[in-house]
Every structure is written in C-alpha cells, then in structure tokens.
C-alpha cells in the first residue's frame, strides 16, 4: 500500500469555510444541531478523503482534456454533497447535485446560497432516484456517485443504477464511482434505520448496504458497465485498524464533536493503491456497526 497524499486539509478547510459561511449567511436555518455540525464535523468521516481526492483528480483531468465552447455539465448521483459544492466553487462547470432524500436536497441548496456569489461554477439541485433518473440520454460530460450504489435497495438495485449512470453520460464522458470493498460479500442490515439513513424508531433490521468482494464487484458492477473503457481501479484500505475501530466505538455524538480529527485519522489510516489488493483485511458482519472496518474500491472510466 502506497502513502498517497489525499489532500485532506484542502478538502477539510473548504468544508469548514462552507459551514461557517452557512452560519453567517443563513443563521440557524438548518436547525441548531445541523448548523453546528457543519462546523464541528464538516466532512463526516475520515474514510471520505481518499474518495474526494481520487474523484476530484479524475474530474479535473477530464475537464482539462476536453475542449468545449460551453460549460461542461457534471451530474452527482446521491454523493455526500460537499464534493459537489467544492467542484461548483472551484471549477467552471455546471453541476447538478441529486439525492433521493428531499431533506438532503433542501439542506445543501441552502448551503450553496452562502457560497454561490464567489463560486467559479454553477450548482443546481434535484430530487432523483438513481434507478430511474429523469434526464435525457447522453446529457452529462461527467457522472459521479460516491458511496451510493451499495445502498440502493432491490435485488438488482445497484446494477440498475449503473445502467442509468451510463445512459445519461455522453460518449467519451467520465464515470466515477466508489463502493465498500472487503474480503467477502455481504448485504448488511442496520437496526432502526430504513433507506440507509431514515430513523424508524423501532428495533427492526432493514437493508443498509452491500460490501463487495472481487466476485460481486465483477458481476454487479463491472459486467453492467460494458460501455466503459479506459477503466482504472483504485483500492483504499485501512491501516491501524485498531484506531479505526476505537474511533467508531465512540458513538455518533462524540464523533461529531471531535470531527476536526477526521483529516488526521485519514492520514493515519487510509492507504491507496492502484488495482485491487490481493488481501483486503477488515472486520464486519451481517449487521452494520459504526466500528466496522472495510475498504473502498474506486472506479473511473470513459464511455465508449
């Protein structure tokens, strides 16, 4: 595993500025807890930084390589929205940020209002289901989806989404996506949460996510992406897994209060490498836990 610089502090500082800008511009319009959370934990997990880095690198390289007389169009399908805000602020592109949750759409649309005056690009927002996107064929120059595909419900929900992402991507356009990756495939459930994030107030178990292994990734992702070429796979594994488990065991409120350590944890824990590692050590089971440890697999490619 190589020690790549994942530019943790560049992404963290932007997200922190966005949280402060939201406070000064919108006050507590998002609610006191969320407004404070955007400052104390502007990027919600140490595991996000490699994804931000590799997605942004691939997108910038693609934008630099394309000559166009118009703003290029980028689609975010359900990703953590801070990357979309970062791109809209720092690149001359039109970015459509989508989510299946109306709450997420409204929340980040509000945050964007505090950033747009100084932004280089444009951002708009839409309520969308990744299995059935309401966009024409070949509409976007770039499509990205960070840690989303694994949460899509239905026996073939992830595969359906891959077809949709490629349908709305222009020929020659860039696709970037990431999924959890480990030594064995599992379809995890979560207690008291439906739709990956909505609290139900009960003790029932609901589908949460898929953690892929080589075989499942090949069948459910790669075989559905036959329209892609120039595919690159980047594996992100976790070193110091005891530290990852210890931090996960702190509880949601405690992790939020010390969110400033996330970039430091990323430097200590995350390691990237080209291709898929022969062994992907981790610790996870059928029921999701905050102290689970597994890696990520990032795919980028261009539509034929």
Image: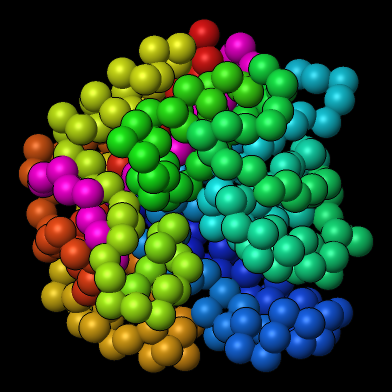
Residue lying farthest to the right in this orientation: 117
- Tally the numbered discs: 0
Q: Is 180 above or below relative to 216?
A: below
- Residue in the picture at 60% in, 58% down: 101
- Does residue 241 appear to the left or right of 72 in the view shown? left
In front here: 55 or 304?
304
- Residue in the picture at 28% in, 77% down: 203
* Color theme of the render: rainbow
Give, as a single range, the part of the protein colored magenta: 170-191
- Does residue 273 appear to the left or right of 125 in the view shown? left
- Does residue 295 appear to the left or right of 77 in the view shown? left
Main secondary structure of the magenta stretch:
strand
Hey, which quadrant is residue 246 in on the image? bottom left
In front here: 152 or 277?
152
Residue 29 in magenta stretch: no
Q: Is 136 above or below relative to 107?
A: above
Position in image of residue 244 (x %, y %): 23, 73
In front here: 101 or 37?
101
Hey, which quadrant is residue 73 in on the image? top right
Position in image of residue 38 (x %, y %): 62, 78
Position in image of residue 242 (x %, y %): 14, 75
Position in image of residue 288 (x %, y %): 24, 65
Camera sees residue 216: yes
Camera sees residue 178: no
Hey, which quadrant is residue 62 in on the image? top right
């Amino acid at each position: 595993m190589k020690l790549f610089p994942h530019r943790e502090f560049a992404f963290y500082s932007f997200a922190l500025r966005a949280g402060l800008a939201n406070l000064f511009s919108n006050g507590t319009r998002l609610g006191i807890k969320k407004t404070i959370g955007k400052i104390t934990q502007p990027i919600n997990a140490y595991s996000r930084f490699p994804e931000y880095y590799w997605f942004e690198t691939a997108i910038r390289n693609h934008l630099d390589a394309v000559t166009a007389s118009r703003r290029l169009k980028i689609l975010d399908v359900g990703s953590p929205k801070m990357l979309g805000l970062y791109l809209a602020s720092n690149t001359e592109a039109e970015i459509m940020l989508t989510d299946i949750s109306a709450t997420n759409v409204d929340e980040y649309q509000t945050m964007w209002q505090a950033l747009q005056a100084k932004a280089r690009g444009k951002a708009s927002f839409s309520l969308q289901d990744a299995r059935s996107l309401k966009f024409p064929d070949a509409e976007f120059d770039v499509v990205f989806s960070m840690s989303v595909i694994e949460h899509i419900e239905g026996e073939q929900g992830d595969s359906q989404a891959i077809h949709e992402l490629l349908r709305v991507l222009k020929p020659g356009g860039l696709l970037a996506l990431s999924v959890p990756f480990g030594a064995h495939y599992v379809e995890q459930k979560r207690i008291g949460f439906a739709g990956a994030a909505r609290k139900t107030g009960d003790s029932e178990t609901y589908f949460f996510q898929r953690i892929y292994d080589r075989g499942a990734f090949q069948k459910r992702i790669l075989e559905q992406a036959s329209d892609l070429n120039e595919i690159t796979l980047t594996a992100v594994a976790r070193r110091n897994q005891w530290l990852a488990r210890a931090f996960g065991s702190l509880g949601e409120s405690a992790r939020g209060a010390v969110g400033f350590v996330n970039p430091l944890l990323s430097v200590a824990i995350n390691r990237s490498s080209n291709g898929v590692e022969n062994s992907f050590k981790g610790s996870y089971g059928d029921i999701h836990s905050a102290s689970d440890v597994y890696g990520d697999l990032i795919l980028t490619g261009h539509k034929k």
